[in-house]
Image (cartoon, helix red, strand yellow):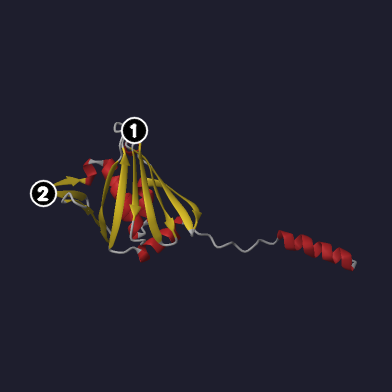
Amino acid sequence: MTSGGRVKVLLVLWALLPLPAAAQWDAAQLLAALARAVPERIAYSETRRLAYLDVPLTTSGELEFRPPDWLRRSVQGSGESYVIAGDAVRIEGSGGGREIPLDMHPALRAFAESLRATLAGDLPRLQRYFIVELQGSEPAWRLQLRPRDASVASVIQSIELSGDGATLRRIETREAGGDLTVTELKDGR
């Protein structure tokens, strides 16, 4: 075989060799990074656009998270807070409080798990309730959550979490009836 023939054979063999896999950035890596970086408290502002109102509703407050499943949402100026712990949500306000079992409200459970599982870095728990799709790259990502359960999908169309690196910046919740809630996280992490 001539040297030109050997070069052609080597080029063909080289082309057939598998390329080393590019570093894949996936939902599991994103959630692990979020879980490592999430602070205990995060300030937020929220805008709700309801189909039956001309003017959006705005609130602000603080989210507190303690892994794996304790989450409190305090609403500034109202004295209201919502605590999700284990299998229940407790609504607390100036007139007292009440507890709602999450198992009685599948859409409420799914919404609670969208936040708790994301902040805890628990992809299997998140996938139990949602079809999970990561878009973008590490510096600018979007995590799209679509409910698996039809009864939940009749209430929640999708939840989109977005951010950069290990920082969750925004949560958009689209309801099946056309309502949209956008939550902006203030403290970066």
Rendered position, 147 above or below 31: above
**Which element type, helix, strand or loop, lies under badge 1?**
loop
- Residue 79 placed where, x, y %? 15, 51
Rendered position, 153 above or below 64: above
- Residue 61 placed where, x, y %? 25, 54
- Residue 3 placed where, x, y %? 88, 68
In depth, the one of 46 and 34 nearer the eye is 46
- Mark number for residue 75? none
How crowded pointer 1 is (Cα within 10 Å; few <14, some 14-19, many 20+) is rated as few
What residue is shown with label 2?
94
In depth, the one of 10 and 105 nearer the eye is 105
Residue lying at the far front of the rendered structure: 55
How crowded pointer 2 is (Cα within 10 Å; few <14, some 14-19, many 20+) is rated as few
Say which quarter of the image contains residue 118.
bottom left
Say which quarter of the image contains residue 14.
bottom right
What residue is shown with label 1?
177
Residue 116 shows in this picture: yes
Residue lying at the far top of the rendered structure: 52
Residue 67 shows in this picture: no
- All told, the count of numbered labels is 2
**Which element type, helix, strand or loop, lies under badge 2?**
loop
Amino acid at dot 1: Gly
Quarter of the image for the N terminus: give it.
bottom right
- Residue 11 placed where, x, y %? 78, 62
